[in-house]
Amino acid sequence: TEETLVLVKPDGVARGLTGAILARIEAKGYSLVDIRLVEPDRGTLERHYAEHEGKPFYEPLLEFMMSGPSVAIRLAGNRVIEGFRSLAGTTDPTTAAPGTIRGDLGRDWGLKVQQNLVHGSDSPESAARELAIWFA
Ligand code: GTP
Ligand code: MG
């Protein structure tokens, strides 16, 4: 069975949406293998977001991710990587489809980085790399 890394990002935790997001994940049928509250330092986030270094939203993204705790989840199930990405919706919460986590629970808050509630690994390679960072 496949595994992925899910993060409930600082906006999700601060807005009290962790339970609602977990309920959607559980209702879909995926299994929680491990879960923890995390307060990542800059080095951890630089590793996690290495692919985005140099992009205009990179610094605001790291600052946002250090603004408060996140919840890291090791999630398992057949095709869970694409399944969770589908459940999360597209990156921009303003236009993410209704029925998705980002589409139903997110919006544009007029900030430098898109606050879109969750992260999910985008490939088996990313999942292995990211799980090693957050669940060392
Ligand atoms: P993750 O699951 O968090 O990785 O989201 P994603 O795969 O849908 O997006 P991506 O990996 O491309 O970007 C990582 C994060 O950077 C996003 O979740 C947003 O928080 C932020 N981000 C991405 N693209 C933009 C952008 O064009 N503008 C702004 N302001 N933020 C962005
Ligand atoms: Mg991504």
Image (spheres, rainbow, N blue to C red):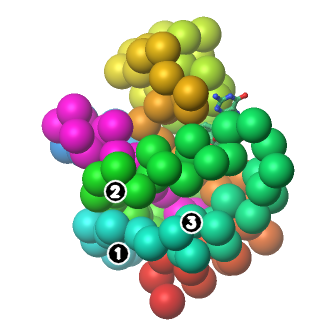
Residue ID for mark 1: 34
Name the quadrant containing residue 81: bottom right
Disc 2 on helix, strand or loop?
strand
Disc 3 on helix, strand or loop?
helix
Picture residue at 62% right of the left edge, 48% below the top: 59
Q: Nearer the viewer, residue 55 or 102?
A: 55
Residue ID for mark 2: 70
Badge 3: few (under 14), some or many (20 or more) residues near its Cα, within 10 Å?
Answer: some
1 or 3: tag closer to the N-terminus: 1
Badge 1: few (under 14), some or many (20 or more) residues near its Cα, within 10 Å?
Answer: few
Q: Nearer the viewer, residue 49 or 134?
A: 49
Q: Position of residue 54 (x, y in %)?
A: 82, 50
Residue 87: mark in rendering: none
2 or 1: tag closer to the N-terminus: 1
Residue type marked 1 = Asp
The total number of labels drawn is: 3
Spatial separation of the CA atoms under disc 2 and disc 1: 14 Å
2 or 3: tag closer to the N-terminus: 3
Quadrant field for ligand 1: top right
Q: Is residue 97 above or below residue 4?
A: above
Spatial separation of the CA atoms under disc 2 and disc 3: 12 Å
The boundaries of the magenta stretch are 1-17
Q: Position of residue 132 (x, y in %)?
A: 59, 83
Name the quadrant containing residue 7: bottom left
Residue type marked 3 = Leu
Residue 14: within the magenta? yes
Q: Nearer the viewer, mark 1 or mark 3?
A: 3
